[in-house]
Image: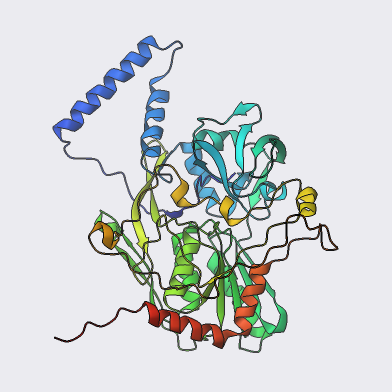
């Protein structure tokens, strides 16, 4: 079970907690109220309760009230987080959040027990073993889902399109994520998938690119970078991966209240840069660090983005250790694409929209559940307490948010087979039409580049007439 309750960027700096030199008078007044409540609860609650438990609960609630990604990490959770970012941790391998007061799956991590058990984005977890999850905090859910390797956990699931609740039994395991997978495609094109951004991801990408380069005698014909259902991970890895595909220029910048959060990250100029055709695949499960990569390559027109709207997590979380080996995961900044776009609660709009097909009834019966479509995906804007984009529209006054660099072309969803299809293809695996579309873009690269250039010209501001 991933300690990342919602996919997010981890910026783990060597930051000590800043202790206030002085507090406003109204703060002391509110703290006195808190102390009074604490005393009343300890004196009158039906059962004895420790001060530590009450304080931990108060801190947990305080962080949870800010936004979906800020959280209090107990010592155990903090240790698990440090292990997770190295690509190995114990549990189910699932990203969860709370949507409409219900524990909800953001995405299972590819190759993990949750993935193999058939859990899907948008699934609502109604019960964990015999305990209902209504009102359960994300921290409590994480604790209940963790356990020794080989132990079993029963999750009661509600899935859109399935009338009855059903139970999934998942066997816990030590989750070791191979974040990068690579393979050749037809006609000499290459495919590179990044499942998550963790320690070593960029090294694995470099090895895959070197292999492609040797196999193609020093020249890659074209590349598909698949970031679908990539929940994010480490910011430095997202920057390094972006750098691999860019010949200089801005990758991403962050803005927060503290000066330390004003940062810009640039790609390096390269003497032997190969500007081969490139497509980035995204969907509603692409979040955080994967949106940084997609946004950078899109804004610099290095790649054409294909798929569906991304998750829309445009915030930076900083890990602030505390003296008792616990820590705060606190949202400290927004990040912006090179063209100045904040994608917070908006996401990256693909250049070419490509929807996955809806499954046939036979396929549903074979899986025992309905496959996801984009309407079932969870996005940042659906989460309780998500904070706003921060870029006002002209109708509300102030400066308008920069227009997206993309103006979707060929934005016609891929045709879906009718739901009652019982023909010869019924029950067969659903075709990856998004990957097929990516290959089509590579094969007709010049045509798509011309269309995008025209779209960019249409979005360009009209010069004011001279007076």
- Residue at 54% across / 82% down in the picture? 448
- The x and y percentages for residue 24 are 15, 35
Quarter of the image for residue 464 reads bottom left
420 above or below 271?
above
**Quadrant into which the N terminus falls:** top right
Residue 165 or residue 467, whichever sits in front: 467
- The answer to whether residue 352 of the structure is visible from this angle is yes
Residue 416 or residue 343, whichever sits in front: 416
- The x and y percentages for residue 109 are 62, 53
Residue 433 or residue 175, whichever sits in front: 433
- Residue at 78% across / 58% down in the picture? 421
- Residue at 54% across / 30% down in the picture? 134
Quarter of the image for residue 168 reads top right
**Quadrant into which the C terminus falls:** bottom left
Locate residue 234 relative to residue 190 in the image: left or right.
left
Q: Residue furthest right?
A: 424
């Amino acid at each position: 079970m991933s300690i990342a309750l919602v996919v997010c960027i981890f910026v783990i700096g060597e930051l000590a907690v800043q202790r206030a030199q002085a507090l406003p008078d109204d703060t002391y007044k509110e703290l006195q109220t808190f102390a009074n409540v604490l005393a009343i609860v300890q004196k009158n609650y039906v059962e004895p309760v420790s001060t530590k438990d009450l304080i931990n609960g108060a801190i947990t609630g305080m962080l949870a009230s800010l936004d979906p990604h800020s959280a209090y990490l107990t010592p155990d959770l903090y240790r698990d987080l440090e292990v997770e970012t190295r690509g190995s941790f114990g549990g189910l391998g699932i990203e969860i959040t709370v949507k409409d007061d219900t524990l909800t799956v953001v995405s299972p991590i590819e190759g993990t027990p949750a993935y193999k058990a058939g859990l899907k984005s948008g699934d609502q977890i109604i019960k964990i073993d015999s305990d209902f999850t209504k009102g359960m905090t994300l921290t409590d859910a994480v604790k209940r889902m963790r356990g020794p390797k080989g132990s079993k956990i029963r999750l009661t699931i509600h899935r859109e399109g399935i009338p009855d609740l059903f139970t999934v039994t998942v066997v816990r395991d030590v989750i070791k994520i191979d974040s990068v997978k690579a393979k050749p495609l037809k006609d000499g094109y290459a495919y590179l998938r990044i499942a998550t951004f963790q320690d070593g991801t960029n090294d694995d990408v470099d090895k895959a690119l070197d292999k492609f380069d040797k196999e193609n005698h020093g020249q890659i014909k074209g590349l598909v970078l698949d970031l679908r259902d990539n929940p994010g991970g480490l910011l430095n890895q997202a920057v390094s991966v972006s750098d691999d595909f860019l010949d200089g220029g801005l990758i991403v910048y962050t803005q927060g209240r503290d000066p330390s959060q004003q940062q810009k990250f640039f790609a390096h100029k390269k003497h032997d840069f190969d500007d081969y055709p490139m497509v980035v695949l995204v969907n509603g499960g692409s979040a955080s660090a994967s949106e940084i990569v997609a946004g950078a390559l899109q804004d610099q027109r290095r790649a054409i983005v294909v798929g569906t709207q991304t998750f829309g997590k445009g915030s930076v979380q900083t890990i602030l250790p505390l003296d008792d080996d616990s820590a705060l995961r606190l949202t400290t900044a927004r990040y912006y694409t090179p063209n100045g776009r904040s994608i917070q609660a908006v996401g990256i709009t693909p250049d070419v929209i490509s929807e996955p097909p809806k499954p046939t009834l036979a396929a549903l019966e074979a899986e025992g559940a309905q496959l996801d479509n984009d309407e079932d995906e969870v996005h940042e804007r659906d989460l309780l307490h998500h904070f706003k984009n921060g870029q006002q529209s002209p109708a509300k006054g102030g400066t308008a948010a920069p227009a997206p660099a993309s103006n979707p072309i060929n934005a016609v969803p891929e045709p879906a087979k009718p739901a009652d299809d019982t023909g010869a293809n019924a029950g067969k695996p659903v075709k990856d039409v998004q990957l097929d579309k990516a290959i089509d873009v590579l094969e007709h690269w010049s045509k798509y580049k011309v269309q995008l250039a025209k779209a960019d010209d249409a979005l360009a501001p009209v010069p004011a007439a001279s007076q």
